[in-house]
Image: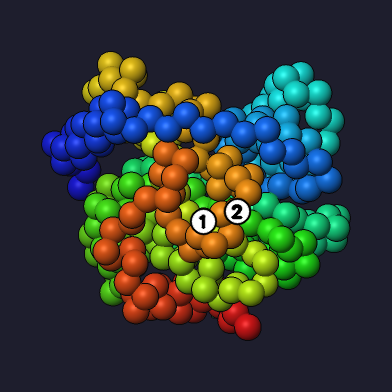
Amino acid sequence: EFSLLSSFYYVFLLLLLCVFFRSVCCNHWSSEERLDGKTVIITGANTGIGKETARDLARRGARIVMACRDLERAEEAQADILEDTGNENVVIRKLDLSDTQSIRAFAELINKEEKQVNILINNAGVMMCPYSKTADGFEMQLGVNHLGHFLLTYLLLDLIKHSSPARIVVVASVAHTWTGMRLNDINSDRNYDPIKAYGQSKLANVLFARSLARLLQGTGVSVFSLHPGVVQSDLWRHQHQCIQMAVKIFRIFTKTTVEGAQTTIYCAVEPGLESQTGGYFSDCAQASCSRTASNDDLAQKVWELSCSMLNITWQ
Ligand SMILES: *[C@@H]1O[C@H](CO)[C@@H](O)[C@H](O)[C@H]1NC(C)=O
């Protein structure tokens, strides 16, 4: 059952948080770092912070693979980025994270076509949507935000390791602090709360980044998760009109998509972050995640559950 009141409660809390952070620590980071000769894959690069991340990294000279479900919107974004940056090395490849067949087809193509992948940005996400399932029967938010990216990373990992030094950036959210993992009802079959399911998928993102960083110790591949801020974007499309209105009214306290992309860009390009692999970032700086998100036992359980849901084994 969708509860307007509890949505309001969380959105209100979130907006309060941004008012607070905006006033005390809006971190204005910028960097001239270049990415010439590097290849970047960004999921959900056709809109919102994904598009702004693509634009910024294209300006730095990287080859950009925009991994998108909606090819028409991706083409518009690509044209916009080309016009803005002059970088002609921006390509679109079809990826639907709600379908493991599409993820496997995408990874196969990338492994065949690309000589290297230096930066993978797991950015795409769905937020607080009505109850629905992916092609493989996973609850949509867990399926797209976590499991889809988990499988994608798994399938591209050899190529990423061969491209080392490399980075994997996982766009999570402060929403990971809202809830725990429901390991015995991971797909919310018994009871669906769109807010908790969103929080759970974002918690899985942070746990995944920690576990993966540990697994990749010594390979030259670093992994970071982050909170982009509360951003004006399409992510709000599933929310009640009143909530969309509230976000608009609080516009001055929320981030633009360009601002929202900065922490992702920071994690992708800032030199010297390797020692902080596995860390969680916010406002272009390392931040603390919730205690649940730093629980290694839980991380291990979620890792194993994810592998068994996807029928994969990591070496
Ligand atoms: C995993 O394997 C089971 C049993 O063979 C199958 O039913 C299921 O569709 C598979 N799931 C995925 C995501 O491959």
Residue 68 lies, in percent from the top left, at 64, 42
Say which quadrant the C terminus sits in.
Answer: bottom right
Image quadrant where residue 70 sits: top right
Residue linked to disc 1: 224
Q: Amino acid at mark 2?
A: Gly
Q: Is mark 2 within 8 Å of ligand 1?
A: no
Q: Amino acid at mark 1?
A: Phe
Horizontal side of residue 11 vs 137, given as left or right: left
Q: Which mark is residue 146?
A: none
Q: Secondary structure at mark 2?
A: loop
Horizontal side of residue 132 vs 165, given as left or right: left
Q: Residue at x 28, y 30 (%)?
A: 24
Q: How is the image coloured?
A: rainbow
Residue linked to disc 2: 272
Q: CA distance from mark 2 to mark 1?
A: 13 Å
Say whether marks 2 and 1 touch (CB < 8 Å).
no
Structural crowding at the residue carrying mark 2, measured as other residues with C-alpha within 10 Å and reported as few (<14), some (14–19) or many (≥20): few
The answer to whether residue 193 of the structure is visible from this angle is yes
The answer to whether residue 198 of the structure is visible from this angle is no
Between circles 2 and 1, the one closer to the viewer is: 2
